[in-house]
Image (tube, helix red, strand yellow):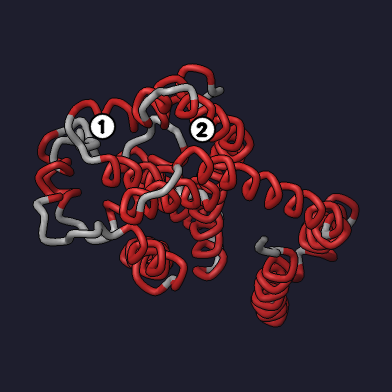
Amino acid sequence: MDMRYWIFLGLVSLCMVALVWGLYGLWRQVLDPRQRALVQRLRPAHPSLPTEQSLQLRQHRLLSTTPALERWLRRLPGVLPLDQFLLQTGLSWRVAHVLTLAVAWVLLSVAVGGRLAWPGVLTLALAVLGELALVAYLQHRRSQRMALIGLALPDALDLIARSMQAGHAFTSALHLAAKDSPPPLSQELRTVFEEINFGVGTAQALQALSARVASDDVRYFVVAVVIQSETGGNLADILKNTANLIRERQKIAGVVRVLSAEGRISALVLSLLPFALAVFMAVLNPGFISKLWTEPLGLQLVYFSLTLMAIGMLWMWKLIQIRV
């Protein structure tokens, strides 16, 4: 088949991946009502103050170790949300690493599809599945890190509250919590403490914490401190109440996970069963199952079935995602 066709197919794969990622980033940053409410709540009480000057004291993350590539990536739209997402995973990967993996997989998919003479749709599906697998892995790492931070946060808030009742200031109490908390929460609290000592305002440092962690429990803590700084009150009691609130939310979330376990297992089995059955039939009777990709009607059935399966998986995933 013409090489220009495969080059065009590879470019289409990259464009589709970029479109999906851009739409997801647009939703997260602009259209999500929860994000807009959070930004409104975390906005400083005096917006006319030069808060941008304090924000510039933070160290910028490098997108690439190559200066030329770094400047080029800075000009691309959607790169900064991707960098923020990588920061939330806790991995040491840079944006250049992730984009290199994505491009390499697309090129490998095009090479495999051309070598095996696959139809263009199957090659495109292979490229998209690989990119989705990469995103799923990063999302899994991010979710694991957020879960560890959420489990350790109530005890850290209790420690901050007891330290403040003993006479410590909020900054020193935060330092004590950073010493006694398990990672990765200890690393995040230490970063907040260092930023405040370096000159960043407390509200801005906590706002950066909520952006790095992207956890609802951490946002409750940040919003509580920001509101107390605007309106006054006993911060130690507020932090104790926030810790109790987070513990109750975690208990309810555990009950929800137990009650929805049957649905999650059913969704997993129904999602993997067609692929496992296809592999089993290909081993037992290759001539029978090969009709699905050697005959035009078989290919149409495969495309239609994969589309319905994708819709069904998305539907089941939305059903078992219960927000607490």
Name the side, left or right, on which 289 lies relative to 181: right
> At x 77% / y 61%, what residue is drawn?
271
| Circle 1 residues within 10 Å: few <14, some 14–19, many ≥20 | some
> At x 57% / y 32%, what residue is drawn?
158
Q: Name the N-terminal-most of marks 2 and 1.
A: 2
Residue type beneath disc 2: Ala
Q: Nearer the viewer, mark 2 or mark 1?
A: 2
Helix, strand or loop under label 1: helix
Tag 2 residue: 161
Residue type beneath disc 1: Ile
Name the side, left or right, on which 103 lies relative to 243: left
Tag 1 residue: 196
Nearest the camera: 208 or 164? 164
Image location of residue 105, percent across then percent down: 44, 47
Query: Can residue 159 be seen at all in this image of the molecule?
Result: yes
Query: Can residue 108 be seen at all in this image of the molecule?
Result: no
Helix, strand or loop under label 2: helix
Nearest the camera: 280 or 150? 150
Image quarter of the C terminus:
bottom right
> At x 46% / y 51%, what residue is drawn?
219
Image location of residue 190, percent across then percent down: 38, 25
Position of 271 relative to 111 (above/below):
below
